[in-house]
Amino acid sequence: MLNEVMEFKGRYPQVLLSIFLLFWLALAISPKYLGVWAIENFLSAIVITFLVVTYKKFKFSNLSYTLIFIFMILHTIGGHYSYSEMPLFDWLAQVFDLSRNHYDRVVHFLFGALLFIPAYEFISKRLKVKYFWGYFSAFLFIIASKSIFEVIEFLWVLVTRSDIIGTHYLGMQGDQWDAQKDILLGSLGAGVTWFILWVKQKRNSSTKRKNEVIH
């Protein structure tokens, strides 16, 4: 039984990849805006390819792979419907009389919250920068990633000059400060995860000191 559990843990990233590919194939059928879907999934392809190619050189923890998997699922949904027209959040907007579809806001926040741990894990293990400076570096990485992505989005719209892509890929929904809010939300998400890890670290240190006193 123990061997089977250990074997599953070893194959866990491959299992997540297989599930994601099946999910991706299902949502590749009749996306709402083909141009938006193509751009969003180009980014997905880069991320997945990078993780597969570098797998033998650097393996994330199963927790990090799970967090990446969750974000990629959310991103794939956004690519299928477009972030500004995700049906569930359209319904929520109607029910609660909201001014916009907030799916993009939620995913931008979760970008920071979910990917902070994988970023810290890479920085602490590969670059050997741990604890405060490791957390701070991961936080800066999230902010930089969000900022660069927003710039790339804007430049892509300028290059393509497509009204459909401009409207549904950027997903501004009439908010001129949309990009700044997206960066802020990603930063807040990373900050929340950083705070949770800091509290956990403090508790572990406190427990360790108590155990040392007892013994």
Image (cartoon, rainbow, N blue to C red):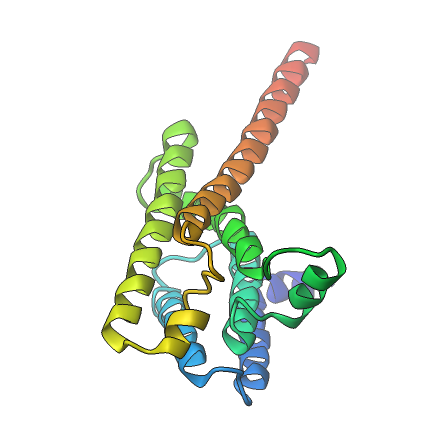
The single residue placed furthest to the top in the displayed view is 213
Q: Quadrant of residue 3?
A: bottom right
The single residue placed furthest to the bottom in the displayed view is 30
How many marks on residues?
A: 0
Q: Which quadrant does the N terminus fall into?
A: bottom right
Q: Quadrant of residue 59?
A: bottom left
Residue in the image at 41% along x and 28% along y = 132
The single residue placed furthest to the left in the displayed view is 159
183 or 67: nearer the eye?
Answer: 183
103 or 161: nearer the eye?
Answer: 161
Percent x, y of residue 115: 48, 51
214 or 196: nearer the eye?
Answer: 196
Where 177 sits versus 133, above or below? below
Residue in the image at 45% along x and 60% along y = 172
Where 180 sits versus 12, above or below? above
Q: Can the viewer see residue 62 in this picture?
A: no
Where 152 sits versus 211, above or below? below
Percent x, y of residue 46: 35, 70
Q: Can the viewer see residue 24 in this picture?
A: yes
Percent x, y of residue 91: 71, 67
Percent x, y of residue 74: 56, 65
Q: Which quadrant does the C terminus fall into?
A: top right
Where 188 sits versus 37, above or below? above
Residue in the image at 53% along x and 70% along y = 78
176 or 203: nearer the eye?
Answer: 176
